[in-house]
Amino acid sequence: MQVERIKFERTGGFAGIRIATDLKLDDLPDEQAHTISELLDDLDFRELPASLVKEEGMADQFTYTITVETKKWQHTVITGDVSAPEKLQELLQLLNRLARTPKRQ
Amino acid sequence: MHQRHPINCIVPPHVLKNIATKGTTAQKELAIETLKRSEQMRGQRQALAEFATAAFRVAVGGKERILYDAKNGSSLPGTVVRKEGEPPTADVAVNEAYDGSGYTYDLYNNIYQRNSIDGNGMRLDSTVHYRVGYDNAFWDGEQMVYGDGDENLPPSERIFNRFTIAVDVMGHELTHGVTQYEAGLTYSQQPGALNESMSDVFGSLVKQYKLQQIAGEADWLIGQGLLSENVKGIALRSMKAPGTAYDDPVLGKDPQPAHMKDYVNTVSDNGGVHINSGIPNHAFYVVATELGGFAWEKAGQIWYVTLKDKLKANSNFQNCGDLTYQAAGEIFGAGSIEQQAVQKGWAEVGITVGSTTPPPPDTGGGGCLEALLRLLGAAPAKGS
């Protein structure tokens, strides 16, 4: 699949600080764009359920919302920390960093 | 031929719970695994809470801590690195989590006569070095988990230090366990913000207890030291002045309100549980400073009794105000200065409690003693 855009939002956590980013894959360095595309392929992202949240009884977990857009479809997945599959955790970590780092001067 | 273990067959949950509580070690483990997997148990933390004491954590009758290292992975609990009574290790996060959960145990045990999270000696399990670049700490329903902040970023980009750096974080997380076993406050909207506030209140009290500070000396900050030197801020939250802990180009401004008129309606963060907690947090701060002295003694006692005996899963801020007012009356007497302080604390955040004029202070002693004497027929009934 040819991913064009990813929207990412992280809320909650001990600090309760929201971070978010809206990325066009074309704007990213090739290597980063490639890694993201590969992770999404491995995950079969489009087939993931809309909600992976199973954090009942937990406190201070992050909640992540990821929306992936291609020319043909758009799919949004909401997940917690513990409930995210390992591959998705890799993607979350990457997006998390991208959402934060470019802004500080 | 493959043999199925009887516990893995269809066994009713109540039977599994019995096995989890009373069976042999191997049986317990199997029963617990099965219960955890079963659909019936999903989301029923109270059911989990009922048997967790005896099964998961053998009651040991005292302080029992185990520290685990996730070694930057996501498997919990990880590898055991320090047990109760063992000397400090070379790992600062391990020692901070060990000491922090110890101070928290001591506050609950020495001041509120509560033996651990469940009141029955539950072992305190903590995992440090969870994942890579994990800027968070959480309670997973069974144990405390701490990340290292932004250790994977270049120093100039770091926002968070390790999450064990502030002792109130351990008090906060462990109190989520206490709340789970007591009020069971739903983690959403106002009940969720109360859940968060209780964790901040007792987290701050743990810090004050450790430092033996009176209310006027305490900083009333949550997560002091957690923000790196790159950030314009002193902590993550301020109970004294919600909304002022940080104001930074990357993090934004501390969004906590200190008054109901500024209550934040949002779907994020389970309905703003870490945001609107500023309101009950500030009410507690006002009560504690109004009363002076060690905050854990009077204000803390009122809040603890409210958490343990009065709040329900769906209680809102108004309920909490009313119930702390009630608790203050029961512990210190109707119209006592303690009850008046509670009234003032909630009034400052825009919540009216005890709106009817309180009766004049009793002249013949405190509420508990008087109530007991009344029960024994040795004191006249109220209003007679």
Image (cartoon, rainbow, N blue to C red):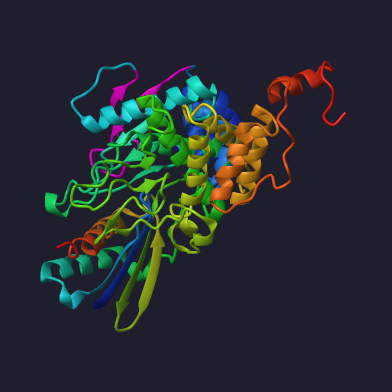
Residue B226 within the magenta-colored segment of the rendering: no
**Part of the protein shown in magenta:** B62-84
Residue at 43 percent of width and 66 percent of height: A50
Above or below for B203 versus A94: above
Foreground residue among B306 and B72: B306
Above or below for B375 versus A53: above
How far across and down, in percent of the image, does residue B113 sit? Answer: 54, 21
Above or below for B34 versus B208: below
Q: Quadrant of the N terminus of chain B?
A: top left
Q: Quadrant of the C terminus of chain B?
A: top right
Counting the numbered discs, the total is: 0
Residue at 48 percent of width and 61 percent of height: B264
Residue B70 within the magenta-colored segment of the rendering: yes
How far across and down, in percent of the image, does residue B80 sit? Answer: 29, 27
Residue at 59 percent of width and 39 percent of height: B342
Does residue B340 appear in this view? yes
Residue at 32 percent of width and 26 percent of height: B99
How far across and down, in percent of the image, does residue B288 sit? Answer: 50, 35
Does residue B6 appear in this view? no
Foreground residue among B204 and B36: B204
Q: Is residue B316 left or right of residue A37?
A: right
Above or below for B57 versus B237: above
Foreground residue among B266 and A78: B266
Q: Is residue B88 left or right of residue B12?
A: left
